[in-house]
Image: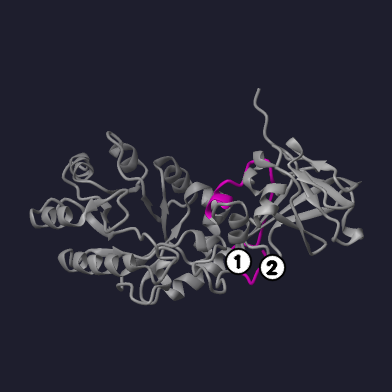
Amino acid sequence: MQFSHEPGADAATLTVDLDALGANWRRLRDASRDAACAAVVKADAYGTGLERAVPALMKAGCRTFFVAQVSEGRRLRHIAPGVEIFVLDGLAPGGAGELIAANLRPVLSSAAEVREWVEACGGTALPAALHVDTGMNRLGLPVDEALRLKSEGAFDGLGDALLMTHLVSAEAPDAPVNARQAEAFRALMQAFSGWRTSFANSSGGFLPDGPPCDLARPGYSLFGGNPTPGRDNPMRPVVRLEAVILQVRDVPAGAGAGYGSAWTAPGPRRLATIALGYADGYPRAAGGTDATIAAGASSGVALVGGVRCPFAGVLSMDLTILDVTDAPAAAVVRGGTAVMIGDGLEIDEVGMRAGTIGYEILTGLGPRYRRVHVGDGTGAGGGG
């Protein structure tokens, strides 16, 4: 017997603002100048739900999407039969038939992948992308090899081909690697004249000297992440996470909290325990301990009654303790809520306070949340 998961009243609520998502895509499209704007929707649309996020992006005007894996591409194809879908992880050995059957376009990263794709297409030049590595040293053909293979006609069997690279440090505009990658890609654009080109990711669209290309491919920023760290976030918040307060108690000075009593009350304190833990995708490293306080290190906070309340102790699998001493008494009640993301507590700050990045927070949002989607991608929308 199979059971569907239906979160109960104690579950945290994840609200996804689809109108904000659509507005963010339009903002990034406008920042792309003359280029078309795709959407990277890997990892279940960065944790927001592929089945709801993609229709909203399509209503906003998006017609090209990127995923990481073939399984994601097949799922997306069921949602959006007529769009262009690229698979970033490329062509696994023997996997061409699966891609062709689902009308997916591989992002080819080696000469072997190119040969296998062309052979599998059986003389029909099917669309694909070619990934050339200009500095990441992860996936992609080295620049010299790509130029040599181009001169040898190795890519002649590709149809409607897209030339792309991946930026190393676009979020740091002054990083020297940005200029080196831009220079290398301009040389590639000359050698691959007539091909469509794609250079900019979320932050790349805001680089002042990026080469003009045909397609931008933002991902994280669509979902509210800041593509311009150190400056005001031009994106609207898309996700809001609230957890339920299960219990409130007063503790005296010197009392410990959580496993290992890693946090000690510096005076009489009021504590609230909420129904959210690391099994819900919230990093355990966000816990507030005596050691992190002594070191002046950042740790997690939540908003209770609009007041920032620090985490008290390490996170449990299903529970987190908050020091709510300074929160309004009316908000600190059983059945009340603590805002974990939203209302000014941005996803990038949440990641920083957990010793990670907002990307990991978003993509780790667990299945136990009660998910609520508002808007459809076209309207003014509410908050985040």
Residue 215 in the figure: left or right of residue 267? left
Q: Which SS class for mark 2? A: loop
The residue depicted at 55 percent of the width and 66 percent of the height is 22
Where, quadrant-wise, is the N terminus in this rendering?
A: top right
Q: Earlier in the sequence, mark 2 or mark 1?
A: 1
Foreground residue, 290 or 221? 290
Query: Gap between marks 2 and 1, in whole Å?
Result: 8 Å
Residue 132 in the figure: left or right of residue 17? left
In the rendered structure, find residue 276 and report the number of the disc placed on it: none
The residue depicted at 65 percent of the width and 54 percent of the height is 295
Look at the numbered discs 2 and 1 and tell me whether their residues touch, using CB distance below 8 Å: yes
Please tell me whether residue 373 belongs to the stretch shown in magenta. yes
Q: Which residue is mark 1?
A: 20
Q: Please give the range of residues in magenta.
A: 359-384
Residue 187 visible in the current orientation = yes
The residue depicted at 21 percent of the width and 43 percent of the height is 121
Q: Which residue is mark 2?
A: 382
Foreground residue, 112 or 156? 112
Mark 2: amino acid: Gly
**x, y (%) of residue 326?**
85, 61
